[in-house]
Amino acid sequence: MPHTESAPDTLRQCDSLITAAAEDLAAGRYRAVLGELLRAGVVESILDPAAGVGNPARECCIALERIARHSVELAEAVQVQALAANTIRRHGSDRLWSALGPGLRTGEILAVNCMSEPNAGSDLSALELTAVRDGDRYRLTGYKNWAAHAAVANELIVYARTSDAGIGGITAFLVPADTPGVRVSAPFEQLRGLAIPVSDIVFDDASVPAERILGRRDRGALVSDILVTQGRLGLAACAIGLGDAAYERALDFAGSTVRFGQVLIEHQSVGFTLADMATGLTAARQLLYHACAGFDRDPLTSTLVCAQAKLFATDTAARITADAVELLGASAYLPGEPVEHSMRQAKLLQTLQGTNRIQRLTIANRLRTDAER
Ligand SMILES: Cc1cc2nc3c(=O)[nH]c(=O)nc-3n(C[C@H](O)[C@H](O)[C@H](O)COP(=O)(O)OP(=O)(O)OC[C@H]3O[C@@H](n4cnc5c(N)ncnc54)[C@H](O)[C@@H]3O)c2cc1C
């Protein structure tokens, strides 16, 4: 049940490229694959167009959903780059964007958002990496973990503490990955079979010019808020693509397998499971598009609906992929059968850009504030 309405032509033409890229990604050719995809224009629609023309967030999500149907890891890789590029464009100086924008579009420059630290995953206000002013530069010292595609990145968006004012004392810096004092670890082993390289990064008195601040000093939380809100939309789109592929696999299996003298789909309980899957996907997609419209109107007032879209779509994908595994029975565990891998991927989507418990917390906090008014 792929959704193709208003999918960009470039994407329609690029389906075979996406399939080939997904295979290359699994073989570890990460940087080359991402570059090929970006140069072919697959990602063009994902880079936030300059000024509210059309419905950019929705176009971006349609593209990500399409990629995720083939490979959710590829979609996540594209989303990492797109979020970083959009953040640099939105919050960086014109000079920074003219220097880096063309390379970010073609994949010659890869960038990544480095927010997480061992004691600051869900809670940005707890971050400990410090940036100390030194004339017209800042010196960064500390540690980041879980930085996706950092091992191949040229630019790192780093959140650092510039004052003790909690969430109001954080500044976002754009740090060249080859800055002396920055050490990116080799990608480390994760849950079996995930293709995105993830690294830790040490900052040891790394010196960065003040002109590389994104947004304003002590206003890094704003930079992060917009990025995370947009990231939640992208993850919802990835979840829908992933869930849709698992649903189609389950539908195909249920329509072609006979048990107890009947095609599986004719057993009412199986038909009902498929009905729930299809309904969940339709609802998730509509909620996502509603959230996209909100984000395009104003990213800062759309946090509630973007959290809802991420929560609903990723929970739906988790349920669909688990149901697909159950429906396929033992054959779900055979080599080459994608639904079992999809089930683990869906679980990851529930965790990224704030766990779904954090999405519920965001929604509940907002409901409480509204009730107190
Ligand atoms: C493959 C992968 C790629 C990633 N890529 C990146 C990246 O590129 N850049 C980056 O910055 N980060 C990245 N991350 C980190 C990711 O964003 C975090 O893992 C995620 O935000 C959750 O943070 P945490 O794991 O530190 O959980 P924690 O904050 O340590 O939370 C642990 C548990 O406590 C719960 N919890 C926390 N606070 C509350 C609360 N107030 N109430 C109730 N429950 C709570 C959480 O839901 C969770 O279950 C990546 C992670 C993975 C696995």
Image (spheres, rainbow, N blue to C red):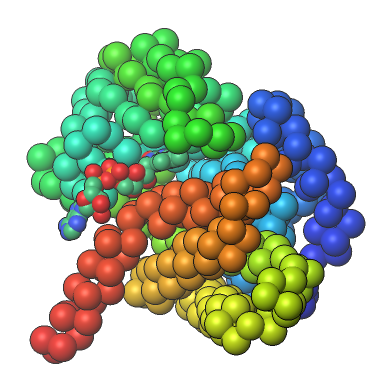
Please give the name of the residue rendered at 22% of the width and 28% of the height, measured from the top-left corner: 130
Residue 258, quarter of picture:
bottom right
The quadrant the C terminus occupies is bottom left
Residue 264, quarter of picture:
bottom right
Residue 12 left/right relative to 86: right
x and y percent of residue 120 in the render?
23, 41
Residue 340 left/right relative to 211: right
How many circles with numbers are drawn on the protein? 0
Please give the name of the residue rendered at 33% of the width and 55% of the height, measured from the top-left corner: 355
The vertical placement of 13 against 116, above or below, is below
x and y percent of residue 236 in the render?
51, 64
The vertical placement of 309 against 146, above or below, is below
Residue 112 left/right relative to 143: right
The quadrant the N terminus occupies is bottom right
Closest to the observer, 253 or 244: 253
The vertical placement of 22 against 75, above or below, is above
Closest to the observer, 329 or 337: 329
Q: Quick one: which residue is furthest to the top in this view?
A: 180
x and y percent of residue 177 in the render?
49, 22
Please give the name of the residue rendered at 34% of the width and 30% of the height, measured from the top-left corner: 145
Q: Quick one: which residue is furthest to the front in this view?
A: 260
Please give the name of the residue rendered at 73% of the width and 79% of the height, measured from the top-left corner: 262
Closest to the observer, 311 or 274: 274
